Structure formats: structure tokens, C-alpha cells
Image (spheres, coloured by chain):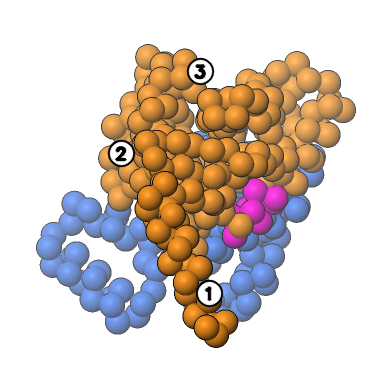
Chain colours: A orange, B blue
Amino acid sequence: MNKFGRLSSLFLLKRLVGLLFGSKKKFRLGIYGPPNVGKTSIANKISVDWLGKEVGVVSDVPHETREVQEVEHLRLKEGSKELDINLIDTPGISTKVDYEDFLKYKLKRKDAKKRAMEATKGIIEAIKWLDEMDAVLTVMDSTIDPYTQVNITILGNLEVRKIPVLVVANKTDLKNSKVQRIKNAFPQYKVVGVSAKNGDNFTELYEAIFKLSKKVK
Amino acid sequence: MRLSLDFMPIDKIKNAPMDKRIELIISKVKEDKIIVFNTLFKPEEEAVLIKKTMENVNKRFPGIEICSLSNNDLIKNASLLTKLRSFMVKLLTGSNQGITVIGPAKIIKKLKREPDSISLLTK
């Protein structure tokens, strides 16, 4: 058997093993969105559910996540199927970072300036990482108008790069949450409403991630 | 406070490389000008614009506010003839029809997309 024949046999064997014993798909799943929509809270919930450890620190102060954080080999299971995910939590994307906004959270001026500089670098890093993603969860705050330029820019860039997207509407535990408003604003995307704070509806989110994985090339 | 609103026809800058176009936009916004474009930016251009803005952020320049409205939004309630005309123009010219407003975050508190307009709230 020549080299090509051996490779074909190996491929067929792998497919057969996959069909008999369930398949394991590996891919990079990014978490994108504006600041303070709960990206890290969602990453933490997913990571704790499947790996038993958190990804990063959560805070009310915007731009808490200022560096890309990656958790490797999250094994999500659904029946005989298994996903091997590298989960990537990214800094919130925004068009402005004003250090004075951090002063409202009682940060010292020096710390606020430092945080602002780190936040700008984080945003640049998050945009650069777009090219590395196989699929993305775009997180939106379901209590506010989702039709913002940042959300449109994120979704547009993923579409241009042909990266499969799932929109996650977070904060459904809050009174003024309106998941339908996000569905109306972006009817072309699958939207799953969750509460990362209470852990609500993550079963549906995991089912949607399995469906999303089928679109990963 | 005095607000300066500049209209920039896309024909004026469309032949310049993307980096140059974005540099020009940021330099104008840093002069506290609000710029109105008769076009929509591509998602890749907006991503580069955000990246370049972040590279320029300092205590005097906290960044930008940006909002765009596509022709589809503008003509949502228009007559069928207007919609057809708009479709034909897009088909023939291939242009991204719409408007985009970009301004300094130092001055603009919020740019909000309304169904067929953009509202601007200053600080």
C-alpha cells in the first residue's frame, strides 16, 4: 500500500471508531462581546461545569478582563458525542476607554489610568485573536438595547471570517431582561438566553454549542 | 461648547489605503470634529478603526463614538419605488449605502441608532 492508501485507511478507521464509540471534535471557542455583559461569568460557569475550575475574576468595574484567557481541553459530553474545547475568554471590545469612568468605582487615579492603558491593549488583543477562533459565543446584555455598533462590528467580523456564531443573551435573571429584543435585532443568529449568575438555561446553551460545533470546519 | 460637524464624501478618500483613511479619521476626531460619511464601513475597517483608536487613547483622547445606519434602515418605511431605486443603485454601484457618524467620546456621550435616524447626546 502506498502512502496515500495508508492515510486513507487511517482516516476511514478513525471515522469508523468515531461512529462506533462516539466522536470527539476539537476546536477553539471564543467568548466575545462588549465590557460588562458577563463574558467571564459565562466562561467560569462553563469551565466549572466541565473542568471544575474558573477562568478568571469577575467584577462590576468594566474591563476587569484585560488579557485573553484560555482554558484548554474542556470536554463537553452529550450522549456518545464529546467536544474537546479550548475556551478563550477575551477582553470586552469598546470604542472608548476613559480612565475617569473608573474613578466612579473608587479606584485611585493612578490605578484608573493603569487600568485604562491595560484595557486598550486588551481590546487590541481581542481583535487580533478573532482570526484564531473556530467558533464564537457573542455575549450580549439582555437588559439593554443590543443594536449597538460594537455588537454589529463583532458579528460582522465573524461573518466575514466565516466563523460560526452563537449569540448568548445574558442576565436573564434581571427584571428588565428582554431576550426577544436581541432575537429581533439579529434574526439571522441562534440566540440562547442564560443567567450566568444563577446558572439558568446552561443545558440549552450546551445543546446549542454541540449544534454550533457541526458548523466548525 | 461649539460642535463642528464635517461631512466627508467617501469619494474623497476611497482611493486611499485603509490605514491612511483610518489615520485621517482619527486625526480629525482628535481635533474634536464629528464626521459624517455617506457610506457604511466594512466590518474589517471598523475593527481596524477600533484597534487604531485604542493605540491612540490617552488622557486627552478617550476614544470614539461611532454609529451607522444602512440605507435599508433609512428606507424601511419608504415606498416600493424608493426601495427598488435603492436596490438598483446598490446593484449597479456596489456601494455600501448608508451613513456613518464618528466623533470624539470626549464630547459625545452617546450616539444612538433610531429606526430611521441617529441621535447624538453630548456631555
Q: Are marks 1 and 2 in contact (CB under 8 Å)?
A: no
**Which quadrant would residue A99 be assigned to in this image?**
top right
In this rendering, would A26 be left or right of A120?
left
Q: Which residue is mark 2?
A: A183
Q: Residue furthest right?
A: A110
Chain under callout 1: A
- Where does label 1 land, which residue? A7
Residue at image point 37% right, 18% down = A176
Q: Secondary structure at mark 1?
A: helix
Range covered by the magenta-colored residues: A124-131
Residue at horizontal 36%, vertical 58%? B70
- Disc 3 sits on a residue from what chain? A
Q: CA distance from mark 1 to mark 3?
A: 48 Å
Graded by Cα atoms within 10 Å as few (under 14), some (14 to 19) or many (20 or more), the crowding at tag 2 reads: some
Disc 1 to disc 2, how far (Cα)? 45 Å
Kindly report which numbered mark, 3 or 2, lies closer to the viewer in this rendering.
3
Q: Is residue A40 magenta?
A: no
**Which chain is disc 2 placed on?**
A
Find numbered disc 2 in the image and state the secondary structure of the residue it sits on: helix
Sequence-first tag of 3 and 2: 2
Quickly name the residue at label 3. Answer: A197
Q: Main secondary structure of the magenta part?
A: helix
Q: Position of residue A84 (x, y in %)?
A: 54, 45
Q: Nearer the viewer, residue B17 or A158?
A: A158
Asked if labels 3 and 1 touch by Cβ distance under 8 angstroms, the answer is no
> In percent of the image, x 56 and y 64: which residue is there?
B45
The x, y position of residue B38, in whole percent, is 44, 65
Q: Judge if badges 1 and 2 mark residues of a common chain.
A: yes
Kind of residue at badge 3: Lys
Q: Which comes before the other along the chain, label 1 or label 2?
A: 1
